[in-house]
Image (spheres, rainbow, N blue to C red):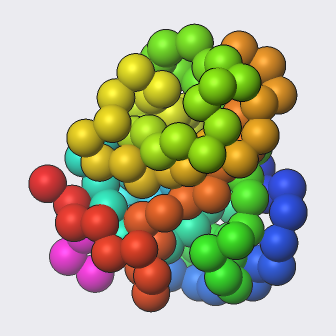
Amino acid sequence: MTGFRPRKGRFVIEWYPKTASEAFAKYDLVYSASGYLTKADATSGDHIGVILKTVAATDDDYASNTFVPVLVPMNPNAEWEVPVGTGTLTAAMVNEKYDLKDANEIDVSATSKKVVTITRFISSSVAWVKINAMIGYGNVATT
């Protein structure tokens, strides 16, 4: 499993222009930079949602700012299943806030941005989370 998979809550699909010449994997968490989607990382904040399309360098529109579908949660209680990329998840981490490793994994050894809250322990390498830093609520600055 890779990326942020929707597990609980209500979601809507919205269309946003992607950054030209940037590759995306389906289920990457994304945010807006200069008006275009870009992949989330350990420093991003105010995310939009999860891209629903893989974008590869071999795509005809790779170098264009074409619109792509993004799954957007309708409220802050939406939950996502996501792999743990750094650190080892424990049941004691439920209800605690952690950082992203990158666009498709979390880092349970870092707490400087606190953009996700662990809601369920699935295994030492998989969690359910709420994304605290979403556009429209949360307001965590990209640094």
Q: Quadrant of residue 53?
A: bottom right
Return the x and y of residue 90 as percentages of the image width and height.
66, 18
Is any atom of residue 19 visible in this view? Answer: no
Residue at image position (44%, 39%) is: 98
Tell me which corner region of the image, top left, top right, bottom left or bottom right, holds residue 107: top left
Q: Residue furthest front?
A: 92
Above-or-below relation of 142 to 129? below
In the rendered image, the quadrant that contains the N terminus is: top right
Above/below status of 136 relative to 106:
below
124 falls in the magenta region: no
Count the marks: 0
The x and y percentages for residue 16 are: 50, 81
Residue 61 relative to residue 10: left or right: left
Predominant secondary structure, magenta span: strand
- The vertical placement of 117 against 30, above or below, is above
Tell me what residue is drawn at x 77 percent, y 78 percent. Answer: 11
Note whether 98 is above or below 141 in the view shown. above
Residue at 34% x, 29% y: name it.
110
Q: Nearer the viewer, residue 117 or 42?
A: 117
Q: Is residue 29 visible?
A: yes
Q: Nearer the viewer, residue 95 or 131?
A: 95
In the image, which residues are magenta?
33-37
- Foreground residue, 92 or 7? 92
- Residue 85: where, in percent of width, then height? 53, 21
Closest to the observer: 30 or 93? 93
Which residue is located at x 66 percent, y 37 percent?
A: 94
- In percent of width and height, residue 41 lies at 34, 43
Question: From the viewer's perspective, is 2 left or right of 64?
Answer: right
Q: Quadrant of the C terminus?
A: bottom left
